[in-house]
Image: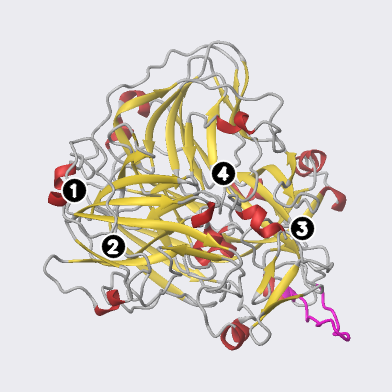
Amino acid sequence: MNDLSRRELLAGTAATSLTAASTSAFAQQSAGAPPQKENVVNLDCSFISVKLPVSVEGQKALKANTATPSDFIPCQLRAYNKTIPGPLMTVYPGQTLIINVKNSLPPYPGNEAWEKQAKGDHNVPHHLGSTNLHLHGMDIIPHLFDPIGTSNPTAPMIEIPPGGSLQYKFEIPKNHPCGLDWYHPHHHGSTAVQAVSGMAGGIVVMGPIDDVPAIKAAKNIYLVVQDIGLFPVDPPVPAQPGVPGSPGTTPQEIGLPAGTDISNVWVYEPKQNAIWQTFGVPNSTAQVTIYDPTTKQAVPQPQLKGGFTTGDYALRYYLCNGEPFYKETHNAKSPTDPIPLPLIPPRFTMAPGEVVRFRMLNGCSDNYMPIAVEGHTMHLLALDGVNFPAVRPLAPVPIPEPPILTPPSNPDVLKNEGQIQLAPANRAEFLIKAIDKPGTYKIVQLAQNQQFLFSAQKTIAEIEVTGTSKIMALPTALPVPSREYPLIKPSEVQVMRTIFFADQFPGSVNPFVGIDFLLNGQQYDVTAINYAVNVTGVEEWHLIVGDSQHGGTEGHPFHIHVNSFEVISVNGKALEPGTIKDTIWIPAESKVVIRMKFKEFIGKSVFHCHILPHEDTGMMQNFLIKKPGEPVPVALNRAPMMAPNRLTAEASHAPDGAPAPMHHMK
């Protein structure tokens, strides 16, 4: 039988621009003196009305305040404090961070259908008006389950309902690494819809690296990349013989006053249990289905324009600091190859010889990004909020011109992985020293075909080198982040585990979604504990995405909460020591080896795929950080179908610096 990819398996009102809403979100930061012991942040979640351009001409008209209705589409997006991205938090080690979250999103009308039809299956997207908060990359107390920091194996996930509020309180460790982290919703069932509608923001942890003279002298430029997925609002449709009707979407459901004309509005507000099919519905004009548990069939819903998607959107925009730089339209003729439209990217000015510190977040719901800066060496300082002890210079790489916007006839041209690789949720911080030659240079995501959808080359931002030359230095040595060093030696590893990522089509465990996203053969169970680990324990995990015969039809990004890890090797190739991350891309047919120490905090937490539609529909598991000697919880008896190894380091020694050998239980 030939290997099959997932795409082959599946084929059978008044508004402001986002740019205007976000100009203050990412202002210049400096270390300065530490502020008060307590740092209080208020976050209010709500819908906002925005205009997104239909074309480059429309984008110019929006910027010039001369736009007419033909230049833009009116959208209802979700946001923190009415800005996309949300406000940048500045945090210091040793601080007490208090975050007051208020949920001003309207009630979601599909809750009853979820309970009655899907039997409350939490791997079916649901409760789209409910939210909570995750501080991604922060080494802090586990905070997904109720109450915050609980060690109760069966504790439910925190849910802040519409109209509700919750205070989070975090003690930031005094030796917390300094760098770029971020925050986003993490309520299982509504994470993807909320995040791909705009709900995300940055966190910068200040610290010793900010006082390195060459870094302190450099201007900070934040590059927060997000994607926005959209569908037309569902109109009211009366029932007809053989065709189900629909009440449509009401203005109140998407944050607008009753009586507002929303006939031209775009939003991501799927009806409960509705699935938008990237490949369409065979023998039907419908693009949306709803699974009928009685007949065990996905029933076409021609009256619906949108639904939850694990693939493409009818329309998708990519934003940098809230400013659209790229637009994609679903391609009915070639469903996994969206129709591209490059827009005008933001432009930053540098003088020849000037050094600027770029701090970049891939906040996309599912897009893997190989990044390159045209014509410039990238002086890499940090990944995922943890700096290296020394700068890592990365030479320029070729950037295709004209850009690769559609799948090339020769896929070998897509092997260029750029200077850095950012999976969804990864961050990178780097210095750019402008070359002497004036001109405009691109910061680019190179094209890649490692996922279900082809991802075209995109110019995220531009650097204009102009003006009088400056003389600015580059650093070499950097402060050592003491919480992550010294690095773990292979002889210190106490436990080894193996985590398998797989998807299965058609879905048997999750027929409402139509595809199963699995970790170790299981879908997520909120009340189970899949692994128990010891605080201060040292473990090595082998993360595997198999071939297409074993569910490996695309790459997956692995993310674990509470602690970072060191990436030891990818497909047997050792990485430079000190490559510390909290999220790592695992290509299809690959194995990644990581090592980590569970340093300080105890409680129930999670790890998962950070492609958010995968996470929301089951590609997540719980683990419990416990004190050594405490009993393993009864909930662990619900073991994965493919049990992980629990081997001692003594049974699996490898030379220092080398990946430990792979072991399999029979």
293 w.r.t. 396: above or below: below
Gap between marks 1 and 3, in whole Å? Answer: 59 Å
Identify the amino acid type marked 4: Gln
Q: Disc 3 or 4, which lies upstream in sequence?
A: 3
What is the number of the mark on residue 450? 4
Identify the amino acid type marked 3: Pro
Task: From the image, state whether disc 2 or disc 1 is nearer to you.
Answer: 1
What is the number of the mark on residue 652? 1
Task: From the image, state whether disc 4 or disc 2 is nearer to you.
Answer: 4
Furthest-front residue in view?
1
Residue ID for mark 3: 74
Label 2, residues with CA under 10 Å away: few <14, some 14-19, many ≥20: many
Q: Which quarter of the picture shows residue 381?
A: top left
Gap between marks 2 and 1, in whole Å? Answer: 31 Å
Q: Disc 4 or 2, which lies upstream in sequence?
A: 2
Task: From the image, state whether disc 1 or disc 4 is nearer to you.
Answer: 1
519 w.r.t. 379: above or below: below
Q: Disc 1 or 4, which lies upstream in sequence?
A: 4
**Is 471 left, or right, of 549 in this rendering?**
left
The local secondary structure at tag 2 comes to: loop
Residue ID for mark 2: 141
Q: Disc 3 or 2, which lies upstream in sequence?
A: 3
